[in-house]
Image (tube, helix red, strand yellow):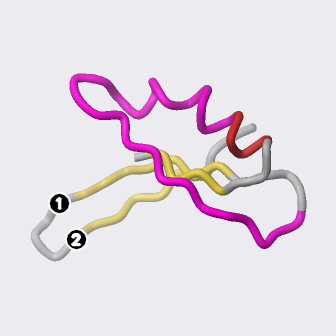
Amino acid sequence: MTPRLRCFEFANGCVNLVDIYYPENAGPWPVIVTIHGRPRTPADMVPVARELARRGAVVYNA
């Protein structure tokens, strides 16, 4: 499963690159936001994000 990468740029110049995982089945889907915390990276949450998407949720991995 390949995530869709999205880049959000805010008015103050802050840029946030996120991975969004989508289920294979037809929606509508619930949305889950994962936040890795420090000192980790979003890559630490990839196995969790993939599993949640496999189970039918859209996962916004920040």
Residue sitting at 41 percent across and 34 percent down? 42
61 on left or right of 39: right
> Up-down: is 44 above or below 2?
above
Tell me the residue that label 1 is attached to. 14
Above/below status of 58 relative to 55? below
Q: Residue furthest left?
A: 12
Q: Position of residue 44 (x, y in %)?
A: 45, 24
Q: Quadrant of the N terminus?
A: top right
| Residue drawn at x 48%, y 53% as measured from the top left | 33
The amino acid type of the residue labelled 2 equals: Phe
Task: Give the residue displayed 89% in from the left and 57% down from the top.
Answer: 25
On the image, the x and y values in percent for residue 12 come to 10, 70
Q: Which residues are magenta?
A: 26-50
Provide the secondary structure element on which disc 2 rests. Answer: loop
- Image disc number at residue 48: none
- Which residue in the structure is indicated by mark 2? 10
Q: Is residue 21 above or below residue 11?
A: above
Q: Is residue 42 magenta?
A: yes
User: Mark 1: which secondary structure?
Assistant: loop
Q: Amino acid at mark 1?
A: Cys
Task: Find residue 56 and report its horizontal and vertical position in percent.
Answer: 78, 52
Determine crowd level at label 1: few under 14, some 14-19, many 20+ residues with C-alpha closer than 10 A: few
Distance from Cα at disc 2 to Cα at disc 1: 5 Å
Tell me, yes or no, whether the two marked residues, 2 and 1, touch with CB atoms within 8 Å.
Answer: yes
Among the 4 quarters of the image, the one containing residue 15: bottom left
Q: Is residue 60 left or right of residue 27?
A: left
User: In the image shown, does 48 or 43 lie closer to the viewer?
Assistant: 48
